[in-house]
Image (spheres, grey):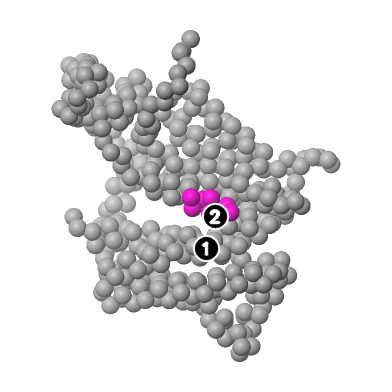
Amino acid sequence: MARFTTRLPAAVRRPRAEYYLLITLLSFAASVSLTRLFLEITGYPQLGGKDLHIAHLLWGGLFLFIATLLPLILANRWVYILTAFLSGIGVGLFIDEVGKFITQNNDYFYPASAPIIYAFFLLTVLLYVRVRRQPASNPRQQLYEILEGLEEVLDHDLDQEEKNELAKKLQQINQNNTDQDFTTLATALLNVFENGQIKVLPEKKTALDDWIRKLRKLENKYIHKSTLRAVIAGSLLALGIHSLSQFIPLLAIGINSQPLQKMMVNLFQSGLLTTSGKLHWFSAWLALEGAVGLLLIISAIFLIFGADHRGVNLSYISLLISLTVVDIFLFYFDQFSSILISSIQFILLLGVIYYRKRFLSPS
């Protein structure tokens, strides 16, 4: 029986951790969005009998439990992919019902539920961004990566590129390491790679490889700097005008602003504006929306007149503020109907990042 010890070794980041976390993020977002869409279309049905209601939170807990058990039982690398997928679905189904468990009357439609879910998602995105950064390389970290990579040898799924990468890391450990145990292990493994009869799979092109190659050809053929700049500038301009239009009625509050009055009546009727404090938050949201809209319009003008660096940097900051601050208010006052706007902002942010990386970053 293994001896228990109180000594905890320093944590080591798992290889491909950012990939697994990305799967969790995508399945989480899809789980919440599709659940809300399904319930809206079907009229919020209840699964159960006369006295029972099997909430989808329970299904989320089941998925989370399965996701927890899999890596405890199975050692294969593909288990982490399945675990990431199931955990994203599980946490989405679980947190979607947060309104029921923070209110005394079990209010599924509690206004703060949407901002809480969105904020939780943003925190996970922040974790993903942090995990994507490459950790400081050291022999111990590299040996962990090598030992996990040896699973490909055991499964007879090692290709030549993977073999070369593992051998390169082993050579680096031998050259830069001062720990004799690490050096001995690396030398033995390197001897197996260089002199052993390790089965290496022949290079094989898959259908996915063909699709990627075709997409890259289309990318080089059709996505030019001027074209992409025009698309991004036009999108920023349209999104900025839309955001600024939310703020303009607030300026015209003394001039019989019908759109603003109608919006506020709907919010009062839905219970989103019941106190003066909430009215102040509503005004703050419109002001932030207008400020971000103005910044987006200015960034679009910069791009139109060729000031790419200024336009890209300003649009990047503006979209980040919109996604991380303004949309928290948006999800409170506009609930889950704002998913479309947030998705457009996120896609546009990816476009800005792609434009900066491909056309503005030094080679």
Earlier sequence position, callout 2 versus callout 1 = 2
Residue 120 rendering spot, x and y as whole percentages: 53, 50
Quadrant, the C terminus: bottom left
What is the three-letter code of the residue carrying label 1? Asp
Above or below — where is 176 with respect to 91? above
Asked whether residue 120 is drawn in magenta, I would say yes
What type of secondary structure mainly makes up the magenta span?
helix
Circle 1 packing at 10 Å, graded few (<14), some (14-19), many (20+), is many
Total numbered labels placed on residues in the image:
2
Mark 2 → mark 1, Cα distance in angstroms: 8 Å
In the image, 78 versus 175, the foreground residue is: 175
Residue 93 rendering spot, x and y as whole percentages: 61, 44
Q: Which residues are magenta?
A: 116-123
In the picture, residue 252 is in which quadrant? Answer: bottom right
Residue 146 visible? The answer is: no
Residue matched to label 1:
327
Q: Are marks 2 and 1 in contact (CB under 8 Å)?
A: yes
What is the three-letter code of the residue carrying label 2? Tyr
